Amino acid sequence: MKVRLNLSTTPQENRRPFLAASVLIAVVGVAALVLLSRAAYSSWQANRQVRSTIAGLQSRIRRSAVEQSQLATYFHTPQAREIMDRANFLNSLIDQRSFPWTDIFASLERTLPDGVRVVSISPKLVNGRAQLALTIGAVNDQQKISFLKAMESSKSFANLQILAEKHDSKADSLDQVLIELSVEYQAI
């Protein structure tokens, strides 16, 4: 029969718990390494797709910038300036044709008191608003004052400015007072 005897001065240590814990920590470490490697790879793939999208967008931006500079040089040529001037002229004609004449005359008809008449009217569009230069004839100063009060209280007209006033004392003259004024028309 064989008997095992430990002849050393210290007994043999049991290393099984240490080995079991080491193996367990190694397995957890390998699992964490696999999981983190997989996450890093998927993140790298996603970033690669984003980088390729960004590169495509940057190339489109560069092409657009080149195209914009080519268009800018074209629009500074004399031919293009001539075409733009002609287009601006045609647009101003269209704006004049689309001027709200009927609305202006209807508003003036509501505003004009008896004894006052429109001698001349000259419209122009300024920043999309109708600016009117009017010459008004009145029978006397009282009619002139009633007209100016009516214009100031009107919702259709704003920024009334009297430019000139003339008095005519001739007996055969229909208008004793002529007023030149500037006013903005506002469609209601």
Image (cartoon, grey):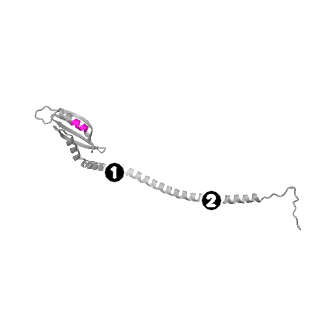
Q: Nearer the viewer, residue 132 or 117?
A: 117
Q: CA distance from mark 1 to mark 2?
A: 64 Å
Give the secondary structure at mark 2.
helix
Q: Viewed as shown, does residue 38 lie left or right of 3?
A: left
Image quadrant for the N terminus?
bottom right
- Badge 1: residue crowd in 10 Å (few <14, some 14–19, many ≥20): few
Residue 101, how many percent across, how many down? 22, 46
Q: Nearer the viewer, residue 58 or 109?
A: 109
- Badge 2: residue crowd in 10 Å (few <14, some 14–19, many ≥20): few
- Residue interval drawn in magenta: 147-153
Looking at the image, tell me whether mark 1 or mark 2 is earlier in sequence order.
Answer: 2
Q: Viewed as shown, does residue 32 lie left or right of 181?
A: right
Give the secondary structure at mark 1.
helix
* Residue positioned 67% across, 60% down in the render: 30
Residue 174, how many percent across, how many down? 13, 36
Image quadrant for the C terminus?
top left
Asked if the residue under mark 2 is in contact with the one under mark 1, i.e. CB atoms within 8 Å, the reply is no
Q: Nearer the viewer, residue 71 or 35?
A: 35
Q: In the displayed structure, would residue 118 be above or below residue 42?
A: above
Residue 153, how many percent across, how many down? 25, 38
Q: What secondary structure is the magenta-colored segment mainly?
A: helix
Residue holding disc 2: 35
Q: Amino acid at mark 1?
A: Ala
Residue holding disc 1: 80
Q: Nearer the viewer, residue 38 or 92?
A: 38
Q: Viewed as shown, does residue 45 lie left or right of 94?
A: right
Residue 135, how many percent across, how many down? 20, 38
